[in-house]
Amino acid sequence: MNIVLWVVQVLLAIAFLGAGFMKVSQPIDKLKTNMDWVTHTTPPIVKLIGALEILGGLGLLLPGLTHILPILTALAAVGLVLTMIGAAIVHIRLKGTAGLAVPIILLLLSLFVVIGRFAIVPLS
């Protein structure tokens, strides 16, 4: 189970680091062409979401790899669950259920890490 959790953590980290770096490094006008929700919020909020995704992605990996405060891995996953709940709400409000698949999948995988790292195979 530990290996499965690590695989999921790495995949989630890749997804969140990629999405986060895109949000913090790309101009807002370029983001608007691919992400409709960006037009409904302010640029600082988009950058904040990107920064949170980067921190969450790093939090999924670094504490477990360095053995420094490994509880932060589970807490990072909790933060990503909350982020994806927010993303799902935004998608529902703006598009209905059309763009809901990715946030729900990421939410469920993050929730799997939360349960796995808090209850099943905690990092030590």
Image (tube, rainbow, N blue to C red):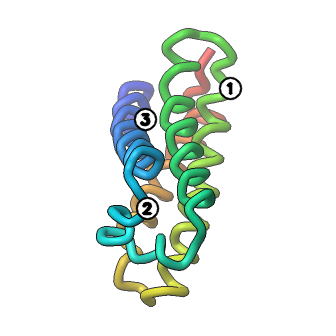
The quadrant of the picture occupied by the N terminus is top left
**Foreground residue, 89 or 73?**
89
Q: Residue at x 55, y 52 (%)?
A: 47
The answer to which of marks 2 and 1 sits earlier in the sequence is: 2
Measure the alpha-carbon separation of dots 2 and 1: 34 Å
Compared across the picture, whether 117 is left or right of 13 comes to right
Q: Check residue 28 in the rendering and tell me which mark sits there, or answer none.
A: 2
Vertical placement of residue 24 versus 46, above or below = above
Label 2 sits on what residue type? Ile
Q: Residue 102 in the image: x percent, y percent?
A: 37, 65
Q: Residue at x 37, y 26 (%)?
A: 3
Measure the alpha-carbon separation of dots 2 and 3: 29 Å
The answer to which of marks 2 and 3 sits earlier in the sequence is: 3
**Label 2 SS:** helix
Measure the alpha-carbon separation of dots 1 and 3: 14 Å
Within-10-Å neighbours for mark 1: few <14, some 14–19, many 20+? some
Q: Residue 50 in the image: x percent, y percent?
A: 51, 49
**Foreground residue, 67 or 96?**
96
Q: Residue 115 in the image: x percent, y percent?
A: 59, 43
Compared across the picture, whether 98 is left or right of 120 comes to left
Vertical placement of residue 57 versus 101, above or below = above
Residue picked out by circle 3: 9
Dividing the picture into quadrants, the one containing residue 67 is: top right
Q: In this rendering, which labeled residue sits more in front, label 2 or label 1?
A: 2
Residue at the bottom extreme, as displayed:
96
Residue picked out by circle 1: 71
Q: In this rendering, which labeled residue sits more in front, label 2 or label 3?
A: 2
**Foreground residue, 68 or 41?**
41
The answer to which of marks 1 and 3 sits earlier in the sequence is: 3
